[in-house]
Amino acid sequence: MAVVPIAVELCLQAAVDDPVGETRWQFWFDQWLRELQPAAAVELSLRLTDDAEIRGLNARFRGVDVPTDVLSFEFEADDTQAQIAEEPLYLGDIVVSVPTATRQAYEFGHTLEVELAWLAVHGLLHLLGWDHPDERSWQAMVTQQARLLKGVNVVYDWPSVYPVG
């Protein structure tokens, strides 16, 4: 059986300089979603921002008044909203702080591009329903992230960054 490519509409918003570029972002999300095989064409937004903006979002939506690296906002359609067959399914929004990613890339000893890919795929998995409330689910999620990154030739040595135990 042939794999049918899934259409991915990526809305990229860069409030700061984009060190990756729209073409690479689109390629990554296309590959990740092809691997994850959603049931329909999808749409999502990726916003690259600074620490001040992500801190405000983190405070407003999570009650945590500090900057963070990535936030995901899964779209929650109510029962009255019918999915139109021709329209892609809106997954939600991923927001990444480029300054925080820059600091983490330096701290973890890899490139900014690698860190941004890690954060973006983490956000995508959250939009698709993944979560990590405990160690077991965290390990499963980061293992999936590493597998998806490997599929786009990005290597992230997460066991050295997030040791078990």
Image (cartoon, helix red, strand yellow):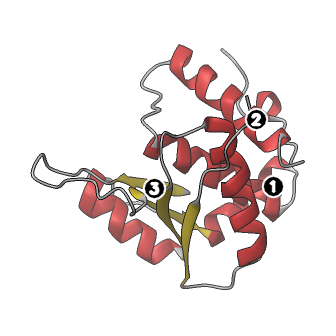
Residue under the point 44% across and 68% down: 54
Q: Quick one: label 3, few (<14), some, or many (20+) residues within 10 Å?
A: many
* Relative height, residue 71 to residue 97 (above, below): above
Element assignment for label 2: helix
Q: Nearer the viewer, residue 37 or 67?
A: 37
Q: Do callouts 3 and 2 mark residues in contact (Cβ within 8 Å)? A: no
CA distance for labels 1 and 3 = 17 Å
Q: Which residue is mark 3?
A: 71
Please tell me which residue lies in front, 47 or 29. Answer: 29
- Provide residue 106's location: percent of width, then percent of height: 81, 59
- Identify the residue shown where x is 27% and y is 57%: 61
Vertical comparison of 95 with 64: above or below = below
Q: Is residue 157 left or right of residue 137?
A: right
| Residue 113 can be seen in this image | yes
Pointer 1: residues within 10 angstroms few (<14), some, or many (20+)?
some
Is disc 1 placed on a helix, strand or loop?
Answer: helix
Q: Residue at x 42, y 76 (%)?
A: 53
Q: Tag 1: residue type?
A: Val
Question: Which of the marked residues, 3 or 2, is nearer the chain's N terminus?
Answer: 3
Q: Position of residue 107 (x, y in %)?
A: 78, 53
Q: Which residue in the structure is indicated by mark 2?
A: 146
Quarter of the picture holding the N terminus: top right
